[in-house]
Image (cartoon, rainbow, N blue to C red):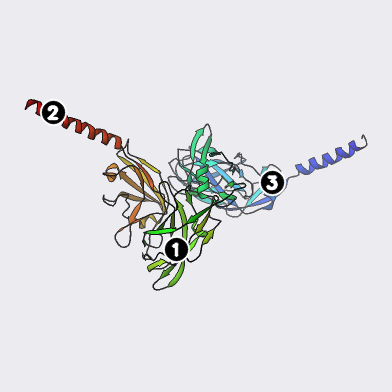
Amino acid sequence: MSRLNPLILIVCCFLLVNNLQEIEVTVGLGRLYEEHTGKKGTIVVTTDYNSAFDNFVDTSKTPIFKTSVSNEGKNYDVDCGFYKTEEENLYIFCNIEEDIPSGNYILSFNESQVIGYENYKITFSGNNNFQFTKYDKDIVDLYSGKQNITVEEGKDSYELKFKISSYNQEKIMLYYAFLDCSQKNEELICLITRKQLDSMVRENELEFKVMYNSYITYSKQFPLIPTVKVIYNNVQKTDVFVLLTKLIENTSESSTTIAYETNVTNIDNVQTDYKYFSLDFNNNDSGTKAGQCSFRKYDDTPLLVVCFVPGEGTNWLKEITEEQIFDNLNIKYRFRLQPVNIEDKIDAKKISSTFIYYFYPPELDFTKDDSLIIEYNMKSPTHSTGITFNENKPDLDCRTLGEEIKRCTVPKSHFEGKKSGYYFTMHKNHLDGKSFNYEAAPVKVILDEGSHSKGNIIISLSLYYWLLLILIMI
């Protein structure tokens, strides 16, 4: 045994020396991930692929070196470092603190600077001047390492954790599912429900982006949060036999949809991807073409089939003569579309229009407020006009924010004479009528019906006592 000790010592020394050898590597600078930051935030620079970092991981966001940002001749030092998660390229981050005034800046890197990092000696190449804007606004800024969600039977919610650089109660989403988040010290803990996951996952393993809305941008992925892998094991799919029963929206434009109601009512909510499901439509002028479709099940509605109509003019669904099976649209359900012949006509016009991706809040509670705000994230919001939930009332007062948001004020009086329940958004179509946006879930509306009932009872009792008093006097 003693004869092996010198050999072991030599090997250990060799490995130690080898590990201490610095690797000289040049990092090619790419572009700014986002050309703005808030009062306190992070500017992130992408880099060219470099195999030297393939097995390297660092999500601590620890500053390693300093550089400068400049504005009209004034320079400010900023702390920078490297950020790397599994299976992603190296990022360079620079912390922009609150003491730097708002304005337009240039972030510069010195190509002659040599940075010691772990066992690397790093120099930069390529573009070394990046322009960005610092706003005097709070903008969310989070980061994290790689996170996975493994779905388990009997577990109804799942947790994701993010480190906070800046957080101001902004809405955080996994894909388009809003997370329920709470801050604990410098960490944001967010929950997503099994119901939300089931509605949007279609494969046993699927990656989703963590996204945010802010003062400047909407539906943007965090640069320093890798995609979240959602994993399902041993899922037994349920067969859902779908029969289209009637056409419930028959007018469409380039980006708006038509919809069919189905016989299915007893499944959980689903929102399938349009890319993987299509139906054939006949057209008077252009023959038969495929239109992209989606299965949509919302609260308090039957399953819907929502489609883009491919042809302009008069269209109708081509007869479905054989059962069509869709096995790859949802993790829980195997949809079996049954033969049917619905010849109801669809009027389509290829003009600029819009498509609703999602809206917030999902619930309008008028028991405490007489007016509320709803924001739609949509394609080309300037082309969406005449937005309403109740076509018997004036259209909502809406304005466009940026390239993706339509913000609308909803007064309580908009639902006068209505009851609490779910209401789909409507918009003005090319026939000057109203069409439903069935691609988006209905909003839940809560009205103070109890107080109205109580008021009616009081009025009735008052009338009763007045009549009684008159009778006594007679």
Residue 340 image label: 1
Q: Which residue is mark 2?
A: 468
Q: Amino acid at mark 1?
A: Val
Q: Amino acid at mark 3?
A: Lys
Kindly state the secondary structure of the residue where label 1 is placed: loop
Mark toward the start of the polypeptide (3 vs 2): 3
Quarter placement of the C terminus: top left
Kindly state the secondary structure of the residue where label 3 is placed: strand
Q: Is residue 237 left or right of residue 3?
A: left
Q: Is residue 357 left or right of residue 79?
A: left
Q: Is residue 147 left or right of residue 263?
A: right
The alpha-carbon separation of the residues under discs 3 and 1 comes to: 68 Å
Mark toward the start of the polypeptide (3 vs 1): 3
What residue do we see at 43% from left, 47% from top?
216
The alpha-carbon separation of the residues under discs 3 and 2 comes to: 97 Å
The x, y position of residue 168, in whole percent, is: 45, 38
Q: Is residue 471 left or right of residue 290?
A: left
